[in-house]
Image: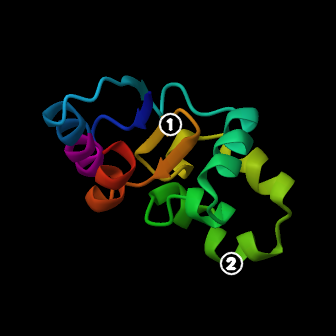
Amino acid sequence: MLTLCYPKCTTCKKALAWLEAKGVATDVRDIKLNNPTEEELRQWHQLSGLPLKKFFNTSGLQYKALGLKDKLPGMSEDEQFALLATDGMLVKRPLLVGDGFVLVGFREAEWAEKLG
């Protein structure tokens, strides 16, 4: 299992503490230092079953600075994937990548359901 986090993010800290408390082993990757590739994002998007917009960190400084609220609707999926791959801070976190599934953001009930 892989968890993509930003170390200073309180939600990420909560998610990692939750995983540890449940005894779930995971590799942790700093999303800012080692941002997801376009190929990874495409694969994870498909596994998640979520709309691509859910992969954007809509409360992040980069999202707001780039004016993405207004630009995203006019962008193609290819353009959105390319943009997400440029900066890990644009990606919603944490991302939990498991065998055959991807969870975006930390919602304890959803994580508990998926991880048993």
Percent across and percent down for residue 47 are 64, 47
Question: Which residue is pictured at 68% across the width and 34% down the height?
Answer: 40
Crowding around mark 1 (Cα neighbors within 10 Å: few <14, some 14 to 19, many 20+) is: some
Question: Measured along the vertical axis of the image, is residue 28 above or below residue 31?
Answer: above
In the picture, the disc for residue 12 is: none
Please give the range of residues in magenta: 9-15
Question: Measured along the vertical axis of the image, is residue 1 above or below residue 64?
Answer: above
Q: Quadrant of the C terminus?
A: top left
> Label 2 vs label 1: CA separation?
29 Å
Identity of the residue furthest to the front in this view = 116
Can residue 85 be seen here? The reply is no
Q: Quadrant of the N terminus?
A: top left
Left or right: residue 112 compared with residue 5: left
Left or right: residue 24 compared with residue 35: left
Residue 88 covered by magenta stretch? no
Question: Which residue is pictured at 39% across the width and 37% down the height?
Answer: 5
Question: Which residue is pictured at 48% across the width and 34% down the height?
Answer: 31
Residue type (three-letter) at the residue carrying disc 1 = Val
Question: Measured along the vertical axis of the image, is residue 67 above or below residue 116?
Answer: below
Q: What secondary structure do most residues of the magenta stretch adopt?
A: helix
Crowding around mark 2 (Cα neighbors within 10 Å: few <14, some 14 to 19, many 20+) is: few
Percent across and percent down for residue 86 are 68, 39
Residue 14 covered by magenta stretch? yes
- Nearest the camera: 115 or 42? 115
Reading the image, the residue beneath label 1 is 97
**Quadrant of the rendered image containing residue 37:** top right
In the picture, the disc for residue 70 is: 2
